[in-house]
Image: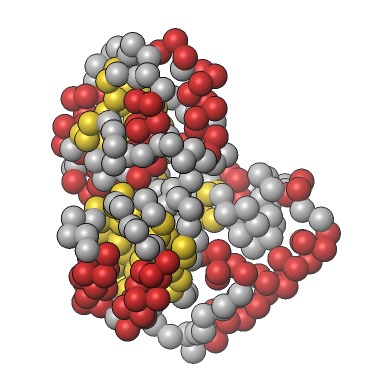
Amino acid sequence: MAKPASPVTVAALYRFARFADPAGLVAPLQAACERDGVKGTLLVAHEGINGTIAGPAAGLRQALAAIAAITGLDDIAVSFSEHAEAPFLRMKVKLKREIVTIGDAGVDPLLAAGTYVAPRDWNALIADPDLLLIDVRNDYEHRIGSFRGAVDPQTGSFGEFPAFVRAQLADAKGRKVAMFCTGGIRCEKASAFMLQEGFCEVYHLKGGILRYLEDVPEADSLWQGGCFVFDERVAVGHGMVADERFRLCHGCRQPLTADDCQHPDHEEGVACRHCAGSLSESQRAAARERHRQMRLAKARGEDHIGPAAQARSQPRER
């Protein structure tokens, strides 16, 4: 008999900061989270900390207090949501070059970044018809939800954003710019890059889409669709509730709509219309076996720890 799901609290967090010895933070953070029964991934680098973790509400509060004490940061940006079951199967703290990868070591949000805009002030800002509104996220995220009128840079990763700005926005440096992303970290770093490139008036949504969906009532919201999150919830909507309209492809980790799942190239647990053409037959066979083992584990009420489970604990870009 499958074990009943236990509700968990999910915390998406980040903070740009100066860490002289980020490697020295890895073991203490790992131990603190494991002690409190928390799972997920934290990334640490010289520029700060980023990650998504989840666990019982009391354990998560204790883990967040421990993270603040270990890092010396008392104002880490955190967005909370609830989920019926754990979206992660293990805890991992990783040492990185950047906590969000833009690929330019000269971009430093601690030196200069755009102006924060609180979620409740966001609607008034983006109502300006002369505003350039940019969705800093990747194309597959924009595809399932965004703010109306937002520019989609059509990037596959955040590291492609500088090339988009230089190629497509060179003539827009005199315009007022507003940017948004999932949890706030990408647009904070992107705003620093744009100021470095000569843009003068740059704003970004504080706490990202997650905080907007948490703070702004649905009746007043200008958000449309689902907000992709990098775990098994796939997407969330207003009130930070999981959006059940979307599923996850275990081949390429992209969100799928009901129409996507009806596409001839879709094979549950193996591939979808977005990745089917890039998989070899041996990769398909391995994916089918992995999916079979995951179904068996679920039927036994167990967690399947394997490549797919490991991928769940990789908070790519928020």
Q: Quadrant of residue 27?
A: bottom left
In the rendered image, the residue lying farthest to the right is 281
Point 49% across, 38% down: residue:
104
Going 77% across and 53% down the picture, which residue do you hit?
Answer: 279
Taking 269 as reference, is 206 above or below it?
A: above
Left or right of residue 158, residue 112 in this image: left
Tell me what residue is drawn at x 34 percent, y 76 percent. 28
Classify residue 224 by image quadrant. top left
Query: Residue 309 versus residue 50: which sits nearer the camera?
Result: 50
How did the renderer colour the structure?
secondary structure
**Residue at (58, 44) in percent of width and height:** 259
Where is residue 156 shown, x and y percent of the image?
Answer: 57, 39
Where does residue 38 sit, x and y in percent of width and height? 34, 75
* Residue ranking furthest to the front: 20
Q: Would you say residue 112 is visible in this rendering? A: yes
- Residue 84 can be seen, yes or no: no
Q: Residue 285, how many percent across, how many down?
A: 79, 66
Compared with residue 288, is residue 6 higher up or lower down, i.e. above or below?
A: below
Examine the rendered structure and indicate whether residue 13 appears above or below residue 129: below
Q: Is 262 in front, or is 233? A: 233
Residue most toward the bottom?
1
Side of 280 where 14 appears, left or right: left
Tally the numbered discs.
Answer: 0
Could you tell me residue 267's position as x and y percent? 69, 57
